[in-house]
Structures are given as C-alpha cells and as structure tokens.
Amino acid sequence: MGKIRLRKDNYGYLFILPFFLIFLGLQIYPVIYTLYLSFQQYDGISRAEFIGWANYARLVKDPVFLKAIINTWRIWICNFIPQLIFGLGLAVILTQVRIKGRNFFRAVYYLPNLVTAASIGILFSALLGRQYGTINQILLKLGIIKEQIYFLGSPGWSSATVSTILWWMWFGHSMIIFMAGIRAIPDQLYEAARVDGAGGWQSFWKITLPLLRPIMIYVLITSLIGGMQNFDIPYVIGEGVTLGTGEPQKALLTMVMYMYNTAFRWSNRGYAAAIAYGLFFIIMVFSVLIFIFMQRRDAESRGIKR
Amino acid sequence: MKKVLVWLLAISMIAVFSLAGCKEEAAEEETAVEEEEVAEEETTEEEVEEVDPASFEGTVEFWCFATEFENFIPKFNEIYPNITINWTNIPNEEIASKLETALGAGTGAPDVFVGEIAYVKKWVDSGVWENLSAAPYNAEELVGDTTPYVVDAGRDADGNIRGLSYQATPGGVFYRRSMAQEYFGTDDPDEIAALMSTLDGYIDMGRTINEESGGENFLLPGWQDLQWFPFNARTNPWVLDGQLMIDQPILDYFDQAKTIRDEGLDNKLAQWSAEWFAGMNGNIFSYILPTWGLFYVLDPTVNPAEPEEGVEYTSGDWAVTGGPASYFWGGTWLGIYKDSPVKDIAWEFVKYITTNKDFLKWDALTYGDYVSDLAVVEEIKDDFSWESLGGQNHYAFFYQEAPKIDSSKITKYDQEIQNMVLAAITAYVEGNLTKEEAIEQFKTDVQTAYPEVSVD
Amino acid sequence: MKNNIFKVKKSEKLFKNFRINIVFLFIFLIILAVICYIPFYIMIINGTRTTTQINLGISLLPGTGTAENYIKMQQSMNIWRGFLNSILIAVPSTLFAGYFGALTAYAFSKFKFRGNRILFWLVLATMMIPTQLGLVGYYQLAGKLHLIDTLWAIILPAIANAGTVFFLKMYIDANVNDTLLEAARIDGSSEFYIFNRIVFPIITPGVAMMSILNFVAYWNNYITPLALLNTKDKFPLPILIALVKGTYKQNIGSQYLAVGISIIPIIISFMFFSRYIISGVAAGAIKE
C-alpha cells in the first residue's frame, strides 16, 4: 500500500479525527448557541431581543442563584464523601478479601444505579410518606420515634434525604470504577510488598491508593461535574404541587433545577443560558483546581509509580 | 413578501378546490349530521351541508398527551376518511417544553397541538396558534352552545378565539355518605351543600367530624386540597397590569390552612401521594375534585377492577355536591399552528373534535366524559346514574356548575404562582416561617420567576 | 504476541492479612445488599400489582395485577417495538463510544501532537455544559441536517463521548507502557495495528467498565430522544414508560411493569460486560 508516512505523533490527529468531527459538528454548535442565547431576552417562542450583559449582571447579584450554588454543593458533598468511602472500601474488599459471593455483591450494589429517576420519585414517595409511609411505619412500630418524621417537610431532612438517595444510587457506580482501577494494578507490586512483610492496610495506603490516583481524579471530577449538574432526583422527590420547585424553602433547589425552571417553566431562555454559563464557570474552576492539585501531588510522589 | 403571496395563493386555491369538490358529491354525509344541525344557526348549517368531509385529504401532524384520542381519531376518520391524523403522544409533563423547542427552532412543529390549562395561555397569548375567530374559520359561529368559560379560556387578549376544547371540567366536593349520615344526620347533596356553602361552614364541618370521631376521621386529606376555593374567590387575576395581586381570599387561605392543620382537621397527606389515594377507602370525609377526578381518580381507587383482599372499598358511599365556590380544574384545548401548511384540514379536525354535536354526544355516552357543549349535555344529562356515587347523577350536577364558572381571570402565570403560594403556605403551616415571612417568600419567588412583574 | 509480560495481570491479589473480622464484614455486606435490593425488589413487585394496590402501600408479596398491567401497557404502546428501538440506539451508541473513545483517549495519552492538552481540556469542558440547555441548539442543528425524527440524531453524538475519553485516557496513562509501544514500532507494526491489537486488549477491562456505564446511560436516555423523535414507532423505552402512566396517574402498575421489563437487558448486559472486568479475578479464585 503506497500510503503517506505520517510522523508518529501526527497519528494523534488522525486518531482524534472522528471524535472531533462529531464533537465540532454536533456539540460545539449547541454550546455556542447557548452563549448567544445568554445575551438575549427570549421566551422560547417569540423573537429574541439582544440585551447585552444584562442577564449576567442579574446573575452575579441573584440571591436565588447563590442559594442554588450552596444547595448543590451541600447535597453533593454529603453524598460524595460517603460514596467515595463505600465505593473505594467495597472495591478493595471485593477484589482483595476472599469472601463468598463477591460476584453477587458486586452486581447487587450496582442495581440502584439502574433505577430511573421517575421510578425513584414514585418509590420514595411511598417509602417516605408522612403519615403512612413505610419507613415511618417501621420506626413507629419499633418504638424508635413517637411521631412521624416529615422527611420532605423541613429543609434539613429533605436535603439529607436527597443526599442519601444519591449515595444509594451512586456508590455501586464508583465501586465498579475503582474495581477496574484496582484490577489494573500489577500483581507483582503486591507480591513484592507481601515479601517485604507489608500487611493489607499497608499495601492499601502504599500501593492501591497512590496507583489509583488517575482513577481518583476521574471519579472526583466526573462526580463533581455530575454533582454540580444534579437535577432529576431533587426534581422528582417533591410531592404534588412542590414537585420540581425545590421546596421546602428552596433547600432542594439545585443550579440545574433553577436553570431548567427558568427556561421551561418561566420561559426565560436567555437568563437560563446565563445560569448555564455560571454553572459552567463554577465547574471549570473547581475541575482545574482539582487537576492541578492532584498533578502536583502526583509529581511529588512519582517515585512510587512503576 | 413573496412568502405571503405564495400563502395567499395556496389558501385561495385550497378554498376553490374544496368548494368545487363538495358541490359534486354534496348530499351524502348529511343524514347523520342533519337532525342535530337543524336547530343550528343558518350560517353553519350552510357550510356543513355543502362540504363533503371525504373531499378533504392530507395528513395532519398532531401532538397531544390525552389518551382519549386513541378513540377520537378513529371516530373522526369515520366521517373524514381521507384525512390522516398523525398523533404523537407525549407525556403531559414534557409536552410544553418539547413544543417550545420545536416552535422556537421553527422546524418540526406539528399542525395541531394541545394546550393544557397550565400552559394554554402561553400558546394563546404568544400568537403561535391561528386566530380562529377570523375567516375562513369563523369559530364564533360554532361556539354558541359551548360552555362560556371554556371558550373564554381559549381567547387571547383581544378576544379572538385561538383554542377550542371538547371538554369542560367543573368540579365539586366529593364526600362520604356514611360519614355525612353519622356526623350531620343527612347524606342529601343539597343539605350538605348548604352546610358547606362558605369556607367557614366547611371548616366547621371538619371540627364536628374531628370531635365526634375522636380525631379518627378527617375533613380533608390535606389543606392543599382546599386551594380551588380561595383561588376562585379572587376578584383580580394574579397579575394585573404587570402588578402581582394578592387578594384577601389568599391572605385568608394562610389562616384557614393553619387552622385546619392546628385543629387536626386534615390528615397531613400530600396531594397525589400513595397515601392520599388510599385515604379514599379510609378516614377522609371529602375530596375536592373535578369531572375527570371522578373517572380517573376516585373510581379506580374506590371501585377497582382488581380488588385487593382485606380492603373495604367505598364504592357507592360517595356523593358529589357544590362547595363554597364554583371552580374548574384542568382542561385541554386544541389549536392550529400559525405556520402549518395544512390549515384547512387541521381546522376540520379541530372543528370536528371540539364542536361536532354528534361526536361530543357519542363521547359523552360512550366514555362518560363531561363535554363542553351545553346543548348536548342538556339533552343527555338526565340519563346518568353513577355507581360509585350511589346512583347519583353527576352529569346533572356538573351541568349546574359549569355555567357559574368565570375563566376571565386566567393568566399564563397561574399554575406557577399558585404553586408558589402553596409552598409559602406550607412553610407557614409547618412552622418554618411566620405568616409575614411566608408572604415575603411568595413575593420573592414570583419576582425570581417573573422579573417583569412588580410585587410591591 | 510478544507483549505477554505487560498484559494486565490475571492472577489473584487476595490478601489474607487484612485484619478485618470476616464475619462482621460479611454481615455488613449482606445488610448493604438488602438496602440496595429492597427498593429494587419493591419496584418489580409493584409491576405485578394494580394501581390501587400500589396506592394502598408497599408490599413484599406479588399482587394480582400482572395481566391487567400488561394489557394496559400494551394498549398504550408496543413495548417490544420500544425494546427494539432502545437496542437500535443503545448498542451502536455503546460500541461507538467505546471504540472511538478508546482511540481518542489513546491519541491524547500517547501522542505528543501540538494542541494535545488544549484539545483535551476542550473535551473536558463540554462535559460541563448541562444537556438540558444545549438541547435547544442541538435541535436547531439537527433540523438543519434533516436528522429530526431519525435514530441517527440520537446515536451520532455517542462518537464524541467526552466522559469515556476522559476515563480511558486516565486508564491508558496508568496501564499502557510506552516501552511496549516502542517495541512494537521497532517491529514495524503500523499505528492502527498497535492500537487494535496491542493497546485495545490491554485496556479491555476499562473499555468494558465504561461500556456498562454507557449502555445504562444510553438505555435510560430520555431527554434527547424526547426532544428529537416524533414518530411513536421510533420511541425508545423510557419515553414509552413515561407515557404508560397516563395523564391522571391511573396506570402506575403498568408503568412499574414496563420499568421492570426495560431493566432486564441492562442486567444481562451488565453480566456480559462485567465478565471482562472481573474474568481475571474469577479465574484466579477458581485456581486457588
């Protein structure tokens, strides 16, 4: 075959070409269109009107957006930390501790991730019902509580409930990713450690954790991105008229929910686009910070790697 | 300019062809339609007699969430065999945003689409729906018998009809006969209606129930169920000349809700939750529901096709009567997209579904739907006897209620603003906020959603 | 092949000296499994109960509504048609995302072409734009390309799955050794050969893992098909499931049944793909 010899590194361009063709064609346009919208006053149906920076001026002073930022972070941190602990712990247990039924556990822990948000809404409204909900009934029968808990009534309880549901849905997901990461760590390292007399915990701190760093960055950043875009669970968990409004007292109002409501319930596409870019900016800043932080740590401890 | 010319040409050609087409094969379809139409105004009679439905040909793209169109479309095709209705069924929660996406992009929008009460004003006011009061539709001539509030809800700010509906959705108070008998000594709908003719009277009934049952039974599943009475007792629309209007009945509703909760008159159930449904076979005296609430909410719960063992169903123990105010809840309007290329056949479809008396009568008699045409309702209203209501004629009741309703206060803001009010009252009732703080929260919410509305 | 020593190890790395009481650990794992399984179980059980029964509360025993739910479900939709559509969307999407994602990630990881880092950051950045709003722009674009109401409109974006690229770049960084690639180049292997025959097998566990997650995501994707598809015959399962409930929530039982049926393929595909991830572990366990 008389083919043109590419310089080796230029094969990189060839390899990313299909991705970028679709990427530029189908994904960049919507992003730019959203940017364009953010300078418009537009209700979604009639003609758009250019209003300059007005949407952004409103955004930086918007107390509701600030509240949404805080809510989003609170819900994310309250579910991410336990999610990380469970995900990592279970990944280690299920790959490194000899225990019966590991395949079974692995599959079962992943199950909650398969349930769609709409089903979660119906299911948990039955579980968390105020008067006759299953959880309240059980707690009453066991004598743990005297009066029913209104899980979705107070800002504190509802926010904790959402974080718990998210933890329940996602720790199996993190577990699987960590398992794939641990599986890729060369066995020889563990062998060597064992020969040196290292215990399970020591190997975990000295081998597993450092070598999982790239996977850890991935989990952290994707979870941050996903967490900042948190929308459907807080949206469906409300009941009746409060469905999707972020009540009680906007404790469940996340950034994307605010954006969604602005765009589709209140028909203010322009401001919604500005919120989207505000959200984008926040995620971007924190992703970069995480990346830089992790890479510096990485550089410091590079001696361990390979 | 060129576009307009093409349009004018196209429309006039369609008009010419359809007229020419019908003259040839006129008289056939009359028989079925005739008897109803004789009583009609001359103008409409003329049209109906002249046009042969079979001469209309083409395909209408139609987006709607209402499952009854499964039955409506085949019925329509019996009369109009050559019009294909391409129905896309989209969940109610999503259809407004899907439509907005298509309308905003200006491509792929359907010829006919639906407006539920929550967003019908959006289509009506923004002008995406064709003006049906104008020629060639002349809808004003067809709505003489339609329940007035239903027509008004489909009118834009200038009074032009843009959406029409086949149904009317007045509501009432559904109550348990056995409890009424026990606590008030009667289960007669008129006597119960007299007791609950004011909100205070209604709440007093709750006190009686609470005392005599020792707190076992409740007036209402939750105070939120009361909402339609204060909402309908408002004298102003929610937004008037860019100003948020908080009328006295709304301020009173804060206190009423608090009273109901503090005195234990409701069972703290959230609307549409599983336990809310279950209360129908339990310890709740009354539910505030409209026409469709009877068919789709109450009946399937108290008279299910597959009964569960160990549950005492309350079918037959219910009755419906008027509460402190007349109200309507929900409703589905149809309109034609302003840029549809097939407006003529789209209009035939909308016209048939929303104003054809044969069709509406068939719908009412076959499915028990409460239809919008008062003449049809009047003709059939005495023949109903509903099982779960102990043989009561619900149709006659709704017939009384429908004309009392005023829909002139509807705005595109209603659904959202009412949810915000309920959220604020919840915060007050649950003790998270004081009344003043709750009202402040409500104003802030409205301001956030609609910066153009002044809240002070 | 000469790269055996570099293959991700197949042997066991169990540690006998983790000082954890195995009995307590086991009890903990079981409790956690119950917490994960119960709501799932209730959901499937609810598929056999009528709407009334569901509204009366939660039950752990099957109800009597399976037949009724099935009939109601099939009345409002053809679930098997939806099944086919979901497969037609999810399978090619998953394959595209896996293969092109790996190819792109490999390029970002191992080729030092100009703009590498910037382009990679650009990929990451798009993950941060919420889909809900980009959708309006995508709809317009799809309209111009005449892709509205075609399955391609849903499938094509899978070629550019930023999350997959991100993960696999991390995975390749950690697991594919440069010396191995150099050795192959010295042997005269073409770049495509190296990717397809050497790199891809090494990263199969990572690709398989990502494919599970992607498959689930594509299978459950709701917003994009909802906005872009108009013909009922093209609707995938999630839209049909949302439709079956009906306007007045009168068919919740049928909805659960549909959800239950729609989950089956995900579980099967999970079993299938997870074999790739854990085959080494399992083989080792048998060996011991």
Image (tube, rainbow, N blue to C red):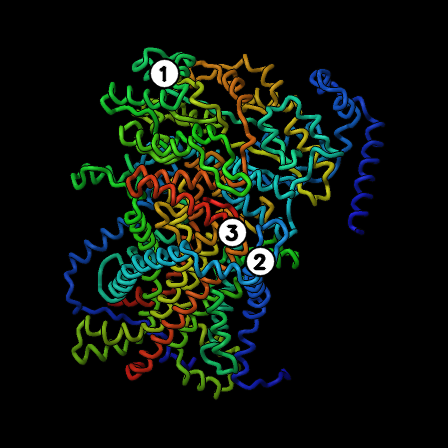
Q: What kind of residue is marked 3?
A: Ala
Instruction: Tell me the residue that label 2 is attached to.
Output: A40
Q: What kind of residue is marked 1?
A: Arg
Q: What kind of residue is marked 2?
A: Gln
Q: In this view, does C184 lie above or below C138?
A: below
Residue A228, by quadrant, is bottom left
Residue C209, how many percent across, how many down? 40, 64
| Tag shown at residue C102 | none
Q: Nearer the viewer, mark 2 or mark 3?
A: 2
Please tell me which residue is depicted at 39% across the width and 26% down the height of the picture.
B287
Instruction: Tell me the residue that label 3 is attached to.
Output: A263
Instruction: Tell me the residue that label 1 is attached to.
Output: B177
Between the C-alphas of marks 2 and 3, the distance is: 13 Å
Residue C249, how many percent across, how many down? 45, 35
| Dot 2 and dot 3 within a common chain | yes
Q: In this view, does C211 lie above or below B396?
A: below
Between the C-alphas of marks 2 and 1, the distance is: 57 Å
Extreme-bottom residue of the structure: C186
> Do the residues bearing badges 2 and 3 touch, measured as CB atoms within 8 Å?
no
Between the C-alphas of marks 1 and 3, the distance is: 46 Å
Read off the chain for label 3: A
